[in-house]
Image (cartoon, rainbow, N blue to C red):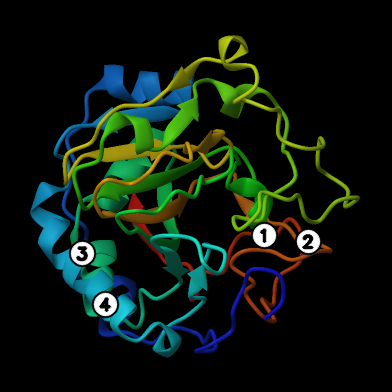
Amino acid sequence: MEGFNQWTVPWTTPELPELDEIRAGNLEPPEFHIEDEQIEAYQRDGVLYLNGAFEGWVEPLRAGLARNLSDPMAFRFPAESNAEGEPGRFFDSYCNWPLIPEYRDFVFRSPAASLAGKVMQGSYAQFFHEHAFVKEAGTQRATPWHQDIPYYTVRGDRSVSIYVALDDVEEDVAVRFVRGSHRWGEVFYPKMWLDGADFNVGEDGYAGTVPDIEANPGSYDVVGRALTAGDTILFSFKTLHGTTDGVMRRRRRAFSTRWLGDDMRYLERAGESSPPFPDPGMSTGDRMREDWFPVLWRH
């Protein structure tokens, strides 16, 4: 294991019937209806809450996550972010959409691609990857304040994560966001989830460590709220977010899909990235290859 990426099932070019249908023009995702005011709020704030947007997908995604948890080493990049002896469990895993049918169905057959394309205000939505999370009851491990983009091998502004709550979550342990931080023009060092330490320190392109949001809460526009299963949060790859170290009183599962818009381009990083796609066959500035990252919605 290097850093936080545990190599299990190797990444390969996905070969799926759905991709053949897309190439043939026979598969289009259903449309998501979203108001212009909501799109404007997303562009302004870098975060948007949608009540019950994917409540019909909660049970299928729970079933997919159960597969993931039943044999983590049979899937890609399983990670345990609780230190030995700590209560509870903080598990995550990603890039398993070609391997877990319920994840794949969400990617191809839910209105997520349409929603992504509309809030990014671009001409297409390109799927990047999915990420599933579990914090079990009793867990007292904060997710450190971070942006997503410094982990990734992409650069640009048009991006969105579509985070679906799979359980009810109390406000004090729900994900929180610094509203407007996607417009700061800064990308901070990525964090190790286990201990909150910076990594890739010294690599070009970073503005330094993430500001200490917890120590200076009045200096930032922090937003967060309780969630009901099926509620959905949209946020930019550049929006700062994290959780407290409050005790989880119940299980918290979530499923997130990441989407790329028109201006997103490949960025070769000198240090570790997440996901660490091997031998990508791209150079910095290239559009992301569609055989690995399919375009699922076009305007």
Q: CA distance from mark 4 to mark 1?
A: 25 Å
| SS class, disc 4 | helix
Q: Nearer the viewer, residue 110 or 206?
A: 206
Q: Are marks 2 and 1 in contact (CB under 8 Å)?
A: yes
Outermost residue, front side: 85
Pointer 3 residue? 61
Q: Amino acid at mark 2?
A: Arg
Numbered badge on residue 40: none
Q: Nearer the viewer, mark 1 or mark 3?
A: 3
Q: Is residue 274 left or right of residue 202?
A: left
Q: CA distance from mark 3 to mark 2?
A: 32 Å
The answer to whether any part of residue 108 appears in the image is: yes
Q: CA distance from mark 3 to mark 4?
A: 18 Å
Q: Nearer the viewer, mark 3 or mark 2?
A: 3
Sequence-wise, the earlier of marks 4 and 1 is 4
Q: CA distance from mark 4 to mark 2?
A: 31 Å
Using the image, determine if residue 105 lies above or below residue 134. below
Numbered badge on residue 269: 2
Q: Are marks 1 and 3 in contact (CB under 8 Å)?
A: no
Which of the image's four quarters has the N terminus?
A: bottom right
Pointer 4 residue? 18
Q: Nearer the viewer, mark 4 or mark 1?
A: 1
Q: Amino acid at mark 3?
A: Leu
